[in-house]
Image (tube, rainbow, N blue to C red):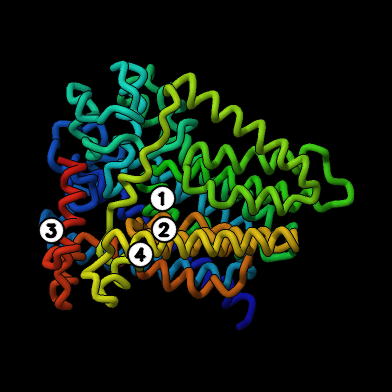
Amino acid sequence: MPRSAAAAVAGAGAAAVVGATTWLVLAAAERPGTLSPPSLRAHATHPWVLGPLHGLMPGLSASPRRLHADVVVVLVVIGVGWVAAWVAAPALGARALLGATAAAHVVLFLGPPLALTDVFNYGLYGRMAALHGLNPYRAFPAQAAADPLYPLANWHHLRSPYGPLFTLGTEALTPLGTHGWLWAWKAIVVLSSLATVLLAAALAQRLGASRPRAIAALGLSPLLLVSEVGGFHQDVPALACVVAAAWCLVRGRDADAPRWADPAAGALVVAAAGIKPSFGIVVGLVVLGATRRPRAIAGAAVAGAVVGIVVLIAYGGALPDLSTQGRLVTPLSVPNLLGLAAGHQGADQSVRSAAQVVLVAVALIATAAVAVRRRWALSAIGLVLFCAVLGLAWVMPWYLVWALPFIAVGRPRFLAPLAVVATCWLAVGSLPQLPGILHSAGYFPTRTSTGLQNHREFVRLVR
């Protein structure tokens, strides 16, 4: 393809992503509805959540059926635009793609949270400790039912599954009030996401990969924009730490590498796990991937000590409640589908345990490989995080973003087409009309004994 034609394709793709994302945000800001968190639809007395873009789309249809159809069209436009921009990115250049990425982030920052209620759960867990004297790792949010954020949250009977560094940070934002807390957190997520895109671009440059492709693959991804940043999820700061750790690993290979590169890598990946415990699975990969492993171990040890002090002093030694959340199941998760195929009627305890064993085995094999060959570290991180998405019974669309920075820089290369397929799969799993789609295909998740039990567990936590 001629360079001018490729540039036009990439430009059109980037414009499609930004334009369609803007439509989603404006539609969500117009009124509580299909694109809003369920709790906001149920408690429309919180119009402040809609933000300054409220009222800019007065002609938006009030028909759920029409909005559902429009959402599908918009998501397809974003997905196609993303792939087009990714493939033809070198012809357009890094600066234009960074501009498109930044524009989409600004629009998302000004809009309300999209679809899910997690951001309000974050605020409530922080307020439990700061204002109500409740340890979020030992008490339930239902014990803080008088808090103004409680009606907007949904994990009413789930102790916090989030990392101690994150929870301590949310406590620090509590003096800003409910409105100020939300805007401060939105700013943290948006800035962390942009930093991750810049780090991925810098990583691509050091690895000899295409900077524009790395920017397009990550920065214009529908899962990063619509699911991750659009929902203002707490994975973003943690992922920024992981990608920064990877950059430090590569910087540490240089002949003139600074002394801080390897210890910083170890400290950053432990900090990521302190924010999002799921990232603990790649700590060994980062430490063993360092050129000077003793320094990386020292950095990880210092950061681990800080996390331990926070756990002991701030939260009395209590840890995130990962086991309860681990019992949740989404209908299209790989373990649930395999459980159906294997005659277990879904992802029961044995299927979930088997999936965890397989994931641990993959992580151990990858860690052993990196112990032999340090240069395999980035590929191993990308592969393990991708496998983690496949192995989770409770899988959300934005989880694929964990692996996307490494896929964006070509580590490993074969995951790029799989990432596109996985994006389609996860997008379908997040559609508001998913139950109707499944029923029309003859799949009724709650009609099996396992599916009904899994659904009851979910209802118990949100009632």
- Marks 3,1: beta carbons within 8 A: no
Q: Which quadrant would the N terminus be assigned to in this image?
A: bottom right
Q: Secondary structure at mark 1?
A: helix
Counting residues from the N terminus, which is met first, the one under dot 4 or under dot 3?
Answer: 3
As drawn, the residue found furthest toward the right would be 255
Counting residues from the N terminus, which is met first, the one under dot 2 or under dot 3?
Answer: 3
Q: What is the three-letter code of the residue carrying label 4?
A: Leu
Counting residues from the N terminus, which is met first, the one under dot 4 or under dot 2?
Answer: 2
Q: What is the three-letter code of the residue carrying label 3?
A: Pro
Q: Which mark is residue 228?
A: 1
Q: Position of residue 399 (x, y in %)?
A: 42, 55
User: What is the CA distance from the residue labelled 4 to the residue labelled 2?
Assistant: 9 Å
Q: Which mark is residue 282?
A: none
**Comparing labels 4 and 1, the label whose residue is closer to the camera:** 4
Q: Position of residue 64 (x, y in %)?
A: 13, 58
Instruction: Determine crowd level at label 2: few under 14, some 14-19, many 20+ residues with C-alpha closer than 10 A.
Output: many
Q: Which quadrant would the C terminus be assigned to in this image?
A: top left
Q: Position of residue 434 (x, y in %)?
A: 21, 65
As drawn, the residue found furthest toward the front would be 350
